[in-house]
Image: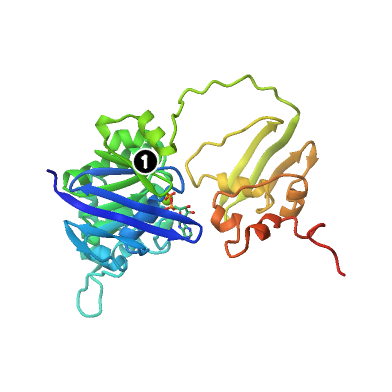
Amino acid sequence: MPEIALEMKNITKRFPLVVANDHVDFKVYKGEIHALVGENGAGKSTLMSILYGLYQADSGEIFVHEKKVNIANPNVAIDLKIGMVHQHFMLVPPLTVTENIILGMEPKKNSILIDMEKAEKSVEELSKSMGFKIDPKAKIENISVGIQQRVEIIKVLYRGAEILVMDEPTAVLTPQEVEELFGILKSLKKQGKTIIFITHKLNEVKALSDRVTVMRRGKVVGVKYTKDTNQEEIASMMVGRKVIFDIKKKPLNLGKTALKVEKLKALNNKGLPAVNGISFEIKEGEILGFAGVEGNGQTELVEVITGLRRASDGKIFLYDRDVTNYSPRNIREEKIAHIPEDRRQRGIISDYTVAENLIFGSHYRPPFNKGLA
Ligand SMILES: Nc1ncnc2c1ncn2[C@@H]1O[C@H](COP(=O)(O)OP(=O)(O)O)[C@@H](O)[C@H]1O
Ligand SMILES: [Mg+2]
């Protein structure tokens, strides 16, 4: 029998509107790369937040190396040699690579001074052990997202992690960076580390993992050795029905041009170019997809079209009418709707009722606004 690094038994976690984890059993062997997969909202991040002590389960038990533990907060998780690389990095941009890595665990020269040389040396050694080089003195704000992710990995290793949790680490990476990340994770596995890898990309499950646990609507619906399963089976477990991979589409009957974007430019929150002269048009009845790695201007593009961000140059036409830099309210009145990427942050106010949320955007008009009595 393989050695068990970690076991979560019968974990249940309720949020006001949903049972995020519903009697979940999750077992990870020492030295394996274990993929945790499921659609958005399946409960993967919640389960890992419980493991890392960010949330407390309503019920259930956690065992690390077969010893029952109570992970009250992330410090306990770190003491148990569990490390987490979050979906959105938690680095401090103006600080250097090394300063970020040692934050809160600074090696001291004496009772006052930090031993920076020693720290930089550990950073270099850790990166070398995984087969890459990193400049320990570089500032976080000046390095790419792919390199920032490596800093996060070194940071958890510096804290002694033996079990590494990575929450959707490839969402922000280019295909080239994904390849490199897989190389790093495989070398960590060779060093005996245990890795939990959250994803919903099935080719990544196949390429990287030894075993896979599939979640759906808060429940575990399957655990497999990766070599004994295939993408079709994992996909159908994820969604609960057969998934057809080759879709046959009817020819499209295109109508008039509905939306036309011309040489659109916009800046991001830091004032740097985010949208650089994009042009496209969408015809009635058409669905247009934008592919790309997160952080390449998709968010800003949507914000400009929906009036949430100013265009610095270029034009947006709705049926030949210029709607560039209309306010969000005017855009809505032009019948352009927007479902934001972060629905909980920007799509709803969760303290308000469903009815109140539903009338947002129309609340100032009859019949909701009856005028001054
Ligand atoms: N802090 C929270 N408050 C309320 N609901 C939450 C919270 N975190 C997650 N949820 C809900 O729990 C469910 C599982 O979410 P999550 O664990 O983030 O899924 P996944 O990581 O698989 O996409 C979702 O329905 C989500 O909306
Ligand atoms: Mg998640």
Outermost residue, right side: 373
Image quadrant occupied by the C terminus: bottom right
The total number of labels drawn is 1
- Left or right? Give the position of 146 relative to 310: left
Disc 1 residue crowd, few under 14, some 14–19, many 20+, Cα 10 Å: some
The structure residue drawn at horizontal position 41% and vertical position 38%, both measured from the top left corner, is 238
67 and 148: which one is in front? 67
Residue at the spot of label 1 = 177
Residue 28 position, x and y percent, is 23, 48
Q: Is mark 1 within 8 Å of ligand 2?
A: no
Query: Hey, which quadrant is residue 20 in on the image?
Result: bottom left
Q: Position of residue 250 (x, y in %)?
A: 61, 20
258 lies above or below 97: above
Vertical placement of 4 versus 236: above or below?
below
Q: Nearer the viewer, residue 43 or 315?
A: 43
Which amino acid, by three-letter code, is at mark 1? Answer: Glu
Q: In the picture provided, is 158 more to the left or to the right than 252?
A: left
Task: Name which quarter of the figure residue 290 lies in.
Answer: top right
